[in-house]
Image (cartoon, grey):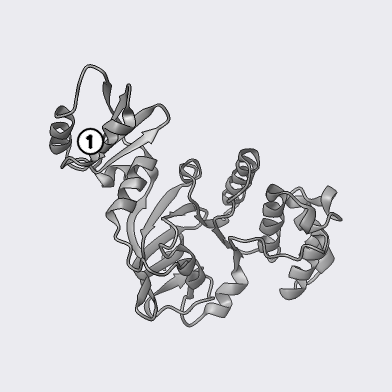
Amino acid sequence: MPDDLAIDVRGMTKRFGDLTAVNQIDLQVRTGEICGFLGPNGSGKTTFIRILCGLLRPDAGNGTCLGHDVIAESEAIKRQVGYMTQRFSFYEDLSIAENLDFVARMYSIPNRRAAVRESLERLGLAERQRQLAGQLSGGWKQRLALAACMIHNPKLLLLDEPTAGVDPKARREFWEQIHQLAGQGLTFLIATHYMDEAERCHRLAYIGYGKLLAHGTVAEVIEQAHLTTWSVSGPNLLQLAEQLRARPGVKQAVAFGTTLHVSGDDASALEQAIAAVRTEAHEWHLIESGLEDVFIHLIEQSPDNFAPRARK
C-alpha cells in the first residue's frame, strides 16, 4: 500500500443470500483526506463501512486499511479506527463523562481519567460533562458520539450519516471540527445525504445499490456524469415537468425552488425535447449541472438490485 493511502481496497464484495449488498468496489482514500460516501438508502454504504472496520468479513476482494489486511488483520484495524453509527448508541441514564469513561474502559486505555478529560475538552463538552446523555439535543449527542469514537486516538474515522436530524448550526460546527482534525492528519470516510456536506469533502465516492458509480473531487464527479442541465422558470412548472419527462432525451425534470432543472446526458436530444414544448411563457437558461443534479441522475440510472426487502 502506498504510504499516503489510509484505505486501499479492491473488489470488495459482500453477499447476504441472493442479495449482493456490496459489489466489486474499489476505493482509495488518502491519509488526512475527507472522503464523502454518498448513495440512496439501501445502497450498501453501511455494509461497506462495517467491512472496513472489521465488523463484517467480505466474501471477495482484498486490500488494506491503515496498512493492515482487511481480511487477515481485522482486529488490528479495529484498534485504530473510530466508528460512529447512524443511531445514538450510548447510555442515556449516564452522564457525558460517565459514557466516555465506559468507552475508555472498553478500550483499556491507560491513564483513563486523563483521556476522558482530554476528550471532554477537545470536543467542548467539559462544561456539560455531568449532564445525562438522554437530556442532550441532537447536536450535543453528536458531539458526544464523536468524542467517544475518538477517545482511543484512532487514525481513521468512519462516520455513518453522523448529522442526520441535526440542525444547520450544529452541522456547520461539526464540519469545522472535521476539517480541523483532518488538518492534523486524521482520515475520514463520511456517509451523508446532504449535498452541502458533500461539497465540503475533499473527494467523493458515490455508491448505487452495491456498485461504485463515481469517485473523485466534486468537479470530477460532475464532469464524469456528462450531464447537460437547463433551468426554466414561469407558470405551471409541474405540468411542464410531466410533459418533459415523457420525451426522449430528458433524464430528469426536477423542481428547484421556483425553477425547474431539466437534464439529460445527450445535449442534442435534450435540446430537441425542450424545443417541442418551449414557448414564450417560460424562460430557459443553460446552466452548469450541480452535484444534486448529478446524484439524482445517478440514482435514477441505478437499478435497485433487491427492491422487495429493505436493507442497509
Residue 149 pos. (x, y %): 66, 63
Question: In the figure, residue 274 lies in which quadrant?
Answer: top left
Residue 214 pos. (x, y %): 33, 54
Residue 256 pos. (x, y %): 39, 33
Farthest residue toward the right? 130
* Callout 1 amino acid: Gln
Answer above or below: position of 157 versus 65: above
Residue tagged by mark 1?
Answer: 243
Answer above or below: position of 302 versus 278: below
Q: Nearer the viewer, residue 241 or 213?
A: 241
Farthest residue toward the top? 280
Residue 182 pos. (x, y %): 57, 51
Q: Residue at x 26, y 23 (%)?
A: 284
Answer above or below: position of 68 versus 152: below
Q: Residue at x 35, y 46 (%)?
A: 296
Q: Nearer the viewer, residue 201 or 21?
A: 21
State the SS at label 1: helix
Q: Is residue 99 visible?
A: yes
Mark 1 closeness class: few <14, some 14–19, many ≥20 residues within 10 Å: some
Question: For this view, does 238 lie left or right of residue 3?
Answer: left
Quadrant containing the N terminus in the rendered view: bottom left
Question: In the figure, residue 245 lies in which quadrant?
Answer: top left
Question: For this view, does 230 lie left or right of residue 37?
Answer: left
Question: For this view, does 29 lie left or right of residue 267?
Answer: right
How many numbered discs, if any?
1
Answer above or below: position of 101 versus 295: below
